[in-house]
Amino acid sequence: MKRSITLAAAMIAAAISGAQAPLSVDTSFRVDLPAQNVRSLAFMANGQFLLSGQMEFPDDSGVRALARINPEGSRDLSFPFTYGGAKLTPWQDRFYVGAGTVRRLMPDGTIDNSFQNMNFDPYFISGQGGDYHVFPDGRVLLGGYHSIEAEHLNLQGDYNLVWFFNNGRLDTTRTHRTGNGAVFGLKQYPQGTAGGLDGKFLVHHWGTQYEGQAVSKVFRIHADGSLDESFNAPIPWGYVWAMEPLPDGRAYLGGTFRLENETDTIQLIRVMPDGSLDPTFNNTIDFTMDASHLALDAAVLDVEHIGHGLLALAGEFSEVEGQARGGLCIVDTTGQVVQHYLDAAGCGNYDYQIGMMTITYGALEGITRAPSGDYYIWGAYHGYNDGTTNDTLQRMVTRLHGGEIGLGVQHARTEEQPMRLYPNPASGFVTVELERVPTAAMLVVRDALGRIVMEQGVNGYINTFSVHGLGEGMYNLELLQHGKRIDIQRVVVQH
């Protein structure tokens, strides 16, 4: 059942007063980058940021793998031509960047020679590149498909997960792990994850076995790299580019893949801590890509929490559930597409010429929030339309106005207000006054991640519940009838 959410009067009033709606395009920011793509973005302390990818700037002599961008969008010409092309990871005042293996860079873009080129190690030979993870102390876990030749250490052959010290030397004290496919994705469960999962990793690879055991395309490993057999995701085929664990142990998996015993390609699911499908999420969201694009199948490439029970999905798609969404879509934490001020928004097509051949892109690689509160999107595209303003001069990176996403976003209403609540902010009890008493109705309180933290049945026109056990912050109060949301309002808890 689709849920229709529209822009409320609060957002209209903000626009009239001169404030910019959240996620609207900032037309004062433009990067002059006509070709080819941006794969990763990382912010610097001084307001600049780094781009990694395959980039052809008009004032450059060739393809640049790494660039530093000034706050208004111009390229910092003092930044050297250096290593890069894949994921950027900030670490202390420096950055790690991938390109088959991993290098560490100083803030000025020069190579940090205290972290050696991995291929300078006498035992390691790089092969197929993949994802990597940086530990707080600077050590690196490298995915992909590589070789180690150290027979005297009982290390010889091909490996999919390889540990390195924080100086770039192979960690010969660890058990490096093997499989029959390159590791393309690594995502560690954050500290404090329920069920003792913190420190473990979700792993995506293009193989069928890991350490001699049959696995799906996504599996979970313990901190030492050994297989966690308590997790089994039902994905026998495909690519999973986004893995986003939740504090309760569930996780979003985005990409383009198929489930067991299914022939349709899907792009986003939420799994339980054991890897099974979460039945409370819409695991069959319909993403499509028009036939002119390079991508044969639509794909979700990034999943970003934007607060108040909403998720931003970036990727290769032109429609979601039959609605125009050019690479950027907002869904709630039940997997329902949100209809709001980004309706019909998205990036424009980019035609890249390779000799006599034209390749059409039009996709977003990712979305993230800057320290300033603004949002940045990046990928391979020309032009961006936020649903209201169409800025045809946007190129590969776009800044979107920040703000509290979800505040002022609510269900379309008639003149009748289904419920009102007070006091708000609240410190002890909240009273919910209903215009009418629906049958089979529930009041549900969700936190910022969409988790249900409280629920109770509707007992009449006046309903009261306690917020003593809730932490300070913003919550969604939903009025449900037969499981369908008929109203939602924001509750601020201040003890």
Image (cartoon, rainbow, N blue to C red):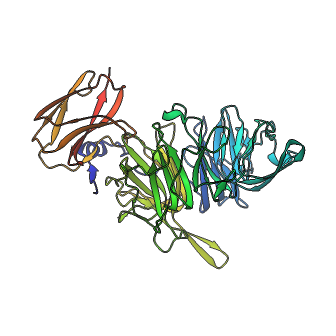
Q: Is residue 29 visible?
A: no
Looking at the image, residue 486 sits to the left or right of residue 307; the answer is left
Q: Eyeballing the image, is 199 above or below 389?
A: above
The percent coordinates of residue 61 (x first, y second) are: 73, 61
Q: Quadrant of the C terminus?
A: top left
The percent coordinates of residue 189 (x first, y second) are: 55, 39
The percent coordinates of residue 50 (x first, y second) are: 63, 46
- Outermost bottom residue: 356
Out of 173 and 96, give the one closest to the viewer. Answer: 173
The percent coordinates of residue 269 (x first, y second) are: 45, 54
Looking at the image, residue 481 sits to the left or right of residue 186; the answer is left
Looking at the image, which residue is at 50% across and 56% down?
234
Q: Eyeballing the image, is 79 above or below 371?
A: below
Q: Is residue 50 visible?
A: yes
Q: Quadrant of residue 135?
A: top right
Looking at the image, which residue is at 75% across and 44% down?
176
Looking at the image, residue 278 sits to the left or right of residue 91; the answer is left
Out of 70 and 400, give the one closest to the viewer. Answer: 400
Looking at the image, residue 196 sits to the left or right of residue 26; the answer is right
